[in-house]
Amino acid sequence: MALLGTLGILVAISIITAATGLARALSGDLTWLGLFAGAFAARAALTGALGIVAARMAATAKATLRKDLVQAAGRRGPAWLSGQRAGELATLTGRGLDGLDGYFSGYLPQLVLSVTVPAAVLLTLATADLASAVIVLLTLPLIPIFGILIGWQTRTATERQWRRLSQLGGHFLDMVTGLPTLKAFGRARAQVDAVRQMADRHRVATMRTLRIAFLSALVLEIVGTISVALVAVPVGLRLLSGGMTLPVAMLVLLLTPEAFAPLRAAGTRFHASMEGLTALDQAFGLLAAPAGARGTVVVEQPFTIELERVTVAYERGVALSDVDLTIREGDRVALVGPSGAGKSTLLALLLGFVAPSRGRVLVNGAELSTLELSAWRSRLAWVPQRAHLFAGTLASNIALGDPSAPFETIERAARAAALPHDLSLTLGERGHGMSSGERQRVALARAFLRDAPVLLLDEPTARLDVVSEKAVVDATLRLAEGRTAVLVAHRPALLAVANRVLRLENGRLLEEVPV
Amino acid sequence: MTSPRSGNLPGNRPDVGPRSGGLPGKLRDLGGEGGWRGFGWGPVARVAWAGLIGAAAEAAGVALMATATWLLMTAAQQPPITALTVAIVSVRALAIGRGGLRYLERLAGHDAVLRIVTELRARIFAHLIDRPPARGADALSRMVSDVDAVQDLVVRVTLPIVASGLICVAGVVAVLGFDPATGLTLAAGLMLGGGVLPVVAAKVVRRGAANLAPLRAEHAVATVDAIHGAADLAAYGATGRYEAIAARHADELSTVERSLARRSFALDATSTVLTGLTAAAVLVVASGRMSQVWAATLAVGALALGELTLNLLGAARKGAEVASGLRRIEPYLGPAEIRWERPEGSSIRLEDVGVDGRIEGVDLDLPHGKKVAVVGPSGAGKSTLLGVIAGAIEPDRGRVVRRGDGVATGLMADAHLFHTSVEQNLKLADPHATDETVMRVALIAGIDVASRYQENVGENGAEFSGGERQRLSLARALLAEPTVLLLDEPTEGLDPAHADEVLARVLKHAHDRTVVLVTHRLAGLDGLGFDEVLVMDQGRIIERNSEGWMRAHPA
């Protein structure tokens, strides 16, 4: 910031020097042109330097925020990230923060200049011609005042309009995305006109907003140009009467617009920079993530896991209520019940992704929240409903829990999970190109490699076709052998793994179904 | 909150029959053949008009400074005041005129471009009916934002170039007429600042974008991995490792951004230096050749014109930025002629049908009333087969014979719920249906919509769960009452007991209609009265009954 300020002051000095040189040269003494050219070049270089410094600040701020946001996501944990939040956060971390460029490279340098340049111009004018200085001093504040007044008057109106505009804009994407459906029901042709009408309504609404929004630009523009007229005409009349010298008059004329230029530039860039500031606001809100209390207790095998009257309430409702359950070493518990009954929540609870709203989760008598979480999780192998596949090789995806695992171990895990692929295969974003079945088998291979005593399986065969299902069921049977397991199951084939079957409905543990 | 978009599926207007699709095949009102890509001369004239107003605004700005200079220089010679009256009035008028003209230009420019975008959206939509884009929501949303590139092209590229360019040229011409040597000096300076530098700037932007794009993509992938994969990372203790990868990519991105900023601001500085040098050169050249009053006036005018070259620099940069978006929508800019027709036929026969890379050698006879189930692994070509039957996918080989009246449609793999009410979404299939009918059919599909009938389903139906969305789409398919009912995984997201119940109800409702059901669940098909169970694998029908399949893969 100090550097920005110094550069701002130097720019102001070079502007005054260049104007002085030019005013003298225009008055007839061309030897002053050298000073003008030199000072003008210095002004250009210094303004460029100001921009570069600001852009560096933008780049640094973005990099720092990007790192911090990803870390904050890690601190908040998967439960918080579920749903739309993950997508929003990923967008914010990527394109959202790019909006900061508008603030740093566009707005900030002009903001600095709109302090230093008007001040320097006013000082110079005051020593050269007090009357002109007074005119500039009186008109200069009109820019921020009008800017604020108009902005304040129109903000609520424009905000309402913008909300509506974005909805109208979204209509087109909605229609294009749904085009196959429209065709299927013979509605596509009729919608061409609907799209046109919608876009036209979009235009009319936009124009209504713009008529007001451009008013502030109009005021900024007019105040700047009017001040030139306000200064030039009296100065001309005083020249006429011999009350002023030509170099001073020219200096006043050349400097007056310079006083307004940075304010105008800052004003026009203010809106673009707001987008960046909104992103910044959002980022700071997310960064204020509370660091979860770290437990220290380490438990050893054999494990006894107990749920004591556990209730888990989300914003959208209760997922589990008053569940009592004891899982002993060697138990292979299958959870059945309709979707939304709280089966996945029970697994998330054991993983430490969610904390009970009421009740306690105990491992060997110690509350789960007091455990050293990474040590506890290293004793678990989790196969989620839909595993995330990472950009990178298939081998690195399988070795997620142990990147230093020797290749033979990874290969063995892949074979055990019936994964047919070459392990050096490189996956695209989010494992693009892998089918649901292959994805599940990668997740199973991860679990095989983990070789943990407790298995948590969340419907490993959901959404699989019959061939894949059979491969996954077989692999699951092999994996569960000799381990403690909690598995969510829909399909009868998987129930063969279990020695206990529990039924969950509406968040309540209903009954133990005999195997 | 009621959405302003409710009721915006005008296909649901009662005056449009369920199978009318009755617009003329050619979209005649697209503006004829003249003008820019058949948009008609209207938009071109509007943009030109906005450009002229913009030019007038810029002219007023240049003239303001030049006139004020002339005023002061003349006043210094202490002529009678009458010699200055015109200049005084002009200065005041130009001061007000410039702002007013800019305001008018902005409005005219935006109105012109929004009219173009309106037409463009309709055209793109019409084009997409015949030529669906490659799969993926990403391609679609990019296309939508590419339309905005047209907006930027007009407002931030064309208009500034027209306005600033016109005034630069006009300024040079005027000075050339006044004094050729001074005019040539000015021309040389403006050519460098307004011609050469913008070309260089555009090149820098293009190269910068080429450097940044892969880095941005890598950073995006790393971020997605760290955030969307958070649960997997936490469970497997790999959070720190992947955070470090994302951080490394953020740093790489930052390094390149800094070097690009250096180049960009260096160009700006060069442009400013050129402006100063041009003004100085004009003053030097003009000083010996005319009165000091005019030499000074032209020098200050040159300074003001030089500032316009900064606009040209900005326009060139923006132009380079939007170029790739424009190239992507290029094929969709022309007038659209919709050839697509939903094919009619109550009895459908597929003969040796093939679709490149999807299905091959498929024979299927669907006489009226036949009930067929298609099973097989994902990627076997089941959904493609349904698409061919519906007429949504044109086969590359073989032929499809359709006889009789009626349509084949239903719940397809790419079923979409529109961002409007439940009612509107369901009535899309039959605008004439009564609310009672809609709710009764929804119950058959296994969803009670009575309490949420007017509720907005959200973007892509986000307000409903995956299973509920599937059942809404199923209800809509039933409501359409097609002659041939196509069902692609209608019970996905339901647990087996519910799924069997719903399927049984749906088939009972379908009564003697032709039904083609695609499913991966072989279990539960018994006793539903299917005439044939096709087993597909790798794009081919490998079995035409269920028994062999059942033996090989007991559930």
Image (cartoon, coloured by chain):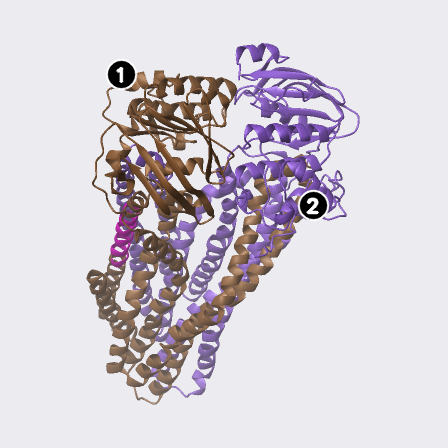
Chain colours: A brown, B purple
The relative height of residue B192 versus residue A375 in the rendered view (above or below) is below
Question: What predominant SS class does the magenta segment belong to?
Answer: helix
Label 1 chain ID: A
Question: Which tag is nearer the camera, tag 2 or tag 1?
Answer: 1
Q: Residue at x 35, y 18 (%)?
A: A481
Residue B70: quarter of image? bottom left
- Amino acid of disc 1: Glu
User: Judging from the image, what secondary structure is the residue with disc 1 in?
Assistant: helix
- Residue B431: horizontal and vertical position, in percent? 72, 44
The relative height of residue A389 versus residue B332 in the rendered view (above or below) is above
The relative height of residue B420 versus residue B287 in the rendered view (above or below) is above
- Amino acid of disc 2: Gly
Q: Nearer the viewer, residue B369 or A11?
A: B369
CA gap between label 2 and label 1 equals 60 Å
Q: Residues within 10 Å of mark 1 (few under 14, many from 20)?
A: few
Label 2 chain ID: B
Which residue position holds label 1?
A: A408
Q: Residue at x 41, y 78 (%)?
A: A229
User: Judging from the image, what secondary structure is the residue with disc 2 in?
Assistant: helix
Which residue position holds label 2?
A: B11
Is A425 displayed left or right of A492 in the figure?
A: left
- Residue A276: horizontal and vertical position, in percent? 37, 55
Is B36 displayed left or right of A56 in the figure?
A: right
Q: Is residue B399 visible?
A: yes
> For residue B301: magenta?
no
Q: Nearer the viewer, residue B374 or B286?
A: B374
Region of the chain picked out in magenta, as a range: A50-67
Point out which mark residue A282 bears: none
